Image (cartoon, helix red, strand yellow):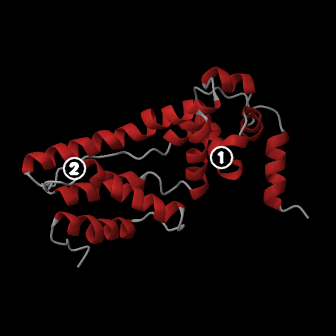
């Protein structure tokens, strides 16, 4: 038996293309949302322009005209939800990193685990996707992290012998492990746990009110 939701989806995907140009922000968002749905459902490797055209009721030629490759289309869809990375100078390295993690996660909470896995898997085999992911999705995070570390060095807050880059990579990696492998919700509680029980002791920083 076909559910009403499946039936509606089937009708949507069999009707002809919509005659709304991609220059229209709402129409562009509709197409990119369809890309996110498909990425989550089938992954990057199986995703095709034909699938997107059918799901979004768009012309494949029109899609290629705006996004010349699958990698560009996928990254454009992900950029819709790219977190707004804000750099807030708290005067403390640990608190600066906490703020960075919170702002980074804020934009991804609406994206599911399947999307993250699809992006990582696709980056292994598609060099263009890997490059665009670094340039357009990760660059703001990396630039904010570099600014935080530069301030921390000036304050003398990075102990001798500590790899400064790892100070940023470790909490990011731990959060991703909990989200991708453990299936946990990427929320503020997880950030506070990583920062207060991981970074703060490493740097000899007293626990904030979050870690008491």
Residue 147 appears in which quarter of the rendering? top left
Give neighbour class at mark 1: few <14, some 14-19, many 20+ (Cα, 10 Å): many
Quarter the C terminus occupies: bottom left
Q: According to the image, label 2 marks what residue?
A: 88
* Image position of 51 with respect to 94: above or below: above
Q: Give me the C-alpha separation between circle 1 and circle 2.
A: 33 Å
Q: Where is residue 43 in the image (x, y as percent from the top left)?
A: 67, 47
Between 185 and 168, the one nearer to me in the picture? 168
Q: Kindly identify the residue that appears in the image at 37 percent across and 45 percent down.
A: 84
Q: SS of the residue at dot 2?
A: loop
Quarter the N terminus occupies: bottom right
Which mark is nearer the camera, 1 or 2?
Answer: 1
Q: How many labels does the image show?
A: 2
Between 20 and 164, the one nearer to me in the picture? 164
Q: Kindly identify the residue that appears in the image at 83 percent across and 48 percent down.
A: 10
Which of the two discs, 1 and 2, labels the residue nearer the N terminus? 1
Q: Position of residue 110 (x, y in %)?
A: 52, 55
Residue 196 appears in which quarter of the rendering? bottom left
Task: Say the numbered circle drawn on residue 50.
Answer: none
Asked whether, in this view, residue 192 is left or right of residue 10, the answer is: left
Q: Position of residue 192 (x, y in %)?
A: 31, 68
Q: Position of residue 86 (x, y in %)?
A: 29, 46
In this view, which residue lies farthest toward the front? 161
Q: According to the image, label 1 marks what residue?
A: 39
Q: SS of the residue at dot 1?
A: helix
Q: Kindly identify the residue that appears in the image at 70 percent across and 52 percent down.
A: 41
**Circles 1, 2 touching at the beta carbon (< 8 Å):** no
Give neighbour class at mark 2: few <14, some 14-19, many 20+ (Cα, 10 Å): some
In this view, which residue lies farthest toward the bottom? 212
Q: Kindly identify the residue that appears in the image at 47 percent across and 65 percent down.
A: 178
Asked whether, in this view, residue 8 is left or right of residue 76, the answer is: right
In this view, which residue lies farthest toward the right? 1
């Amino acid at each position: 038996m076909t559910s009403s939701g499946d039936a509606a989806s089937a009708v949507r995907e069999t009707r002809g293309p919509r005659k709304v140009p991609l220059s229209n922000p709402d129409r562009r968002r509709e197409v990119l949302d369809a890309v996110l749905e498909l990425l989550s459902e089938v992954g990057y490797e199986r995703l095709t322009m034909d699938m997107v055209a059918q799901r979004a009721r768009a012309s494949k030629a029109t899609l290629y005209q705006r996004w010349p490759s699958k990698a560009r289309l996928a990254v454009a869809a992900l950029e819709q939800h790219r977190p707004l990375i804000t750099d807030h100078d708290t005067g403390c390295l640990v608190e600066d990193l906490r703020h960075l993690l919170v702002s980074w996660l804020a934009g991804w909470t609406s994206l599911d685990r399947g999307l993250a896995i699809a992006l990582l898997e696709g980056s292994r085999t598609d060099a263009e996707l890997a490059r665009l992911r670094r340039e357009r999705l990760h660059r703001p995070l990396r630039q904010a992290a570099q600014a935080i570390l530069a301030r921390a060095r000036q304050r003398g807050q990075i102990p001798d012998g500590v790899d400064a880059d790892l100070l940023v990579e470790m909490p990011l990696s731990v959060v991703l492990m909990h989200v991708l492998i453990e299936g946990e919700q990427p929320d503020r509680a997880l950030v506070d746990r990583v920062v207060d029980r991981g970074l703060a002791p490493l740097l000899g920083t007293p626990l904030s009110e979050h870690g008491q």
